[in-house]
Image (cartoon, rainbow, N blue to C red):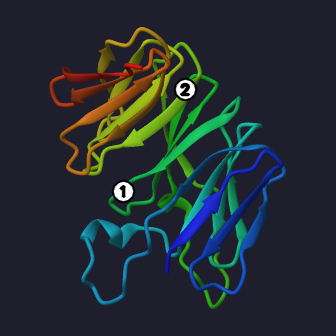
Amino acid sequence: CKTSERKSWGGKVETWSRGAAKEKTLECGQIVWGLAFSAWPAAEDGDTDPACAVGLPCLVLATGLNDGQIKVWEVQTGHLLFSLLGHQDVVRDLSFAPNGSPILVSASRDKTLRVWDLSRDVLFPSGDTFLLSPGRQVQVLSGHVQWVYCCSISPDCSMLCSAAGEKSALLWSMRSYTLIRRLEGHQSSVVSCDFSPDSALLVTASYDACVIMWDPYTGEQLRTLRYAP
């Protein structure tokens, strides 16, 4: 079963599943800028990655709002589980740890990233009710001087890349939450970033109409892709 979502300027998020009877509309109350699904909950047969054993008890969707809130929803029911407070401006992007651990990273126009460990305050379901209290903020990552547009966690969960309205991207350690290096090479704001499936490559995109491919472990520029009309 595949679940999808759609952003909205009207403060709503629509979700639908292949084969489901009907879609769900989540009333967020604010313009929605960022969306991220958690990993699927660990299966009960024990044949999953051990890292998933500490995951959330249900599939959740995090929404980043215009007022700096992050609202976290239970996808199957559409219930609002809790809100995460801390950002002082628009939450522009969100990223869950790909390995299934309940770590969420948020990127904001307040020039910071925030790391949330949802497992610290999540109680597993009792009957049909999920007992949840707000997730705990683990770390505030400061280093950007402009709005942060994008954040991406590497598939091996060792690194975090963030892109902002400046000419460099920042690479962070997901173990120590410290800055590893600044990636410089673009001539305008860096607006997007992503890792390859094996975490061996990192790409950044900029308003300078270029995509740069990096070795995240050394910071070496491997290739620059330029638009040529």
Q: Residue 181's quadrant in the figure?
A: top left
Relative to 31, 92 lies left or right: left
Q: Residue at x 38, y 68 (%)?
A: 54
Q: To which residue does mark 2 refer?
A: 148
Relative to 32, 183 lies left or right: left
Question: Most extreme residue toward the top, as rendered?
Answer: 187
> Where is residue 40 drawn, in percent x and y?
44, 72
Q: Which mark is residue 98?
A: 1
> Where is residue 96 drawn, in percent x and y?
45, 53
In the image, 169 versus 69, the foreground residue is: 169
Circles 1 and 2, Cβ within 8 Å, touching? The answer is: no
Q: Secondary structure at mark 1?
A: loop
> Where is residue 195 drawn, in percent x and y?
31, 41
> Where is residue 2 drawn, in percent x and y?
50, 74
The amino acid sitting under disc 1 is: Pro
Q: Secondary structure at mark 2?
A: strand
The amino acid sitting under disc 2 is: Val
Q: Which mark is residue 45?
A: none
* Pointer 1 local density, CA inside 10 Å: few below 14, some 14–19, many at least 20: many
Q: Is residue 114 visible?
A: yes
